[in-house]
Amino acid sequence: MTTAISYRGDDIFSQLPPQGDEATHPVACLIWGADLRGLGPGRYIRHALHDQASAAFSAIRTQAVLRHLIIAYRCAPQLGNRLRHTAYNESRRLHAAFELERARDVDVIMIDVTELDDNNLAHHRFTELAGKRAGVAGYAAISWSDIQHQPIQTAVKQDVV
């Protein structure tokens, strides 16, 4: 069986390879794009990230075999560090909601891809994670620089907010 990856939300990844048919290959890893550029600092961007996380949660309720949810967001470069704590809290919130609703693990990883410069490498990192069982990560908030030279599962083990 092919491990299906689905890209939804805002189109922040250009020129990625086409994905398989979700009807024949259930989604194991959902990548939710969130474009937060152009939003003001402070509570507006935090609320926008919360709304995007909630939308991703709602969108995947029908995905029975989902193991990993990645919310990849872009923001103004100067806001990345301030938004990381919010991203961590959102990943923890969604992870707990999945456990309550499904009674099983779904990894929730928030990734700041503001500095992303290689979509093919990003797709490779997502594919690596999609082939892993759930529970590898739990929940985390990392940045593109954290996974540029190592797999996502290695970076989330080092994640400390």
Image: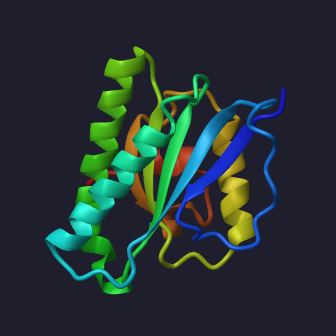
Quarter of the figure that contains the C terminus:
bottom left
Q: Position of residue 66 (x, y in %)?
A: 58, 30
> Going 56% across and 31% down the picture, which residue do you hit?
67
Q: Nearer the viewer, residue 26 or 1?
A: 26
Q: Is residue 5 above or below residue 26?
A: below
How many discs appear? 0
> Going 67% across and 35% down the picture, which residue do you hit?
27
Q: Is residue 130 left or right of residue 84?
A: right
> Going 60% across and 66% down the picture, which residue do you hit?
148
Quarter of the figure that contains the N terminus:
top right
Q: Position of residue 133 (x, y in %)?
A: 61, 27
Q: Nearer the viewer, residue 137 or 11?
A: 11
Q: Is residue 50 above or below residue 135?
A: below
Q: Position of residue 33 (x, y in %)?
A: 52, 61
Outermost residue to the top:
103
Q: Position of residue 9 (x, y in %)?
A: 52, 58
Q: Is residue 138 left or right of residue 129?
A: left
Q: Is residue 159 above or below residue 23?
A: below
Its colouring scheme is: rainbow
Q: Is residue 95 left or right of residue 124?
A: left
> Going 36% across and 83% down the picture, which residue do you hit?
76
Q: Is residue 106 left or right of residue 28?
A: left
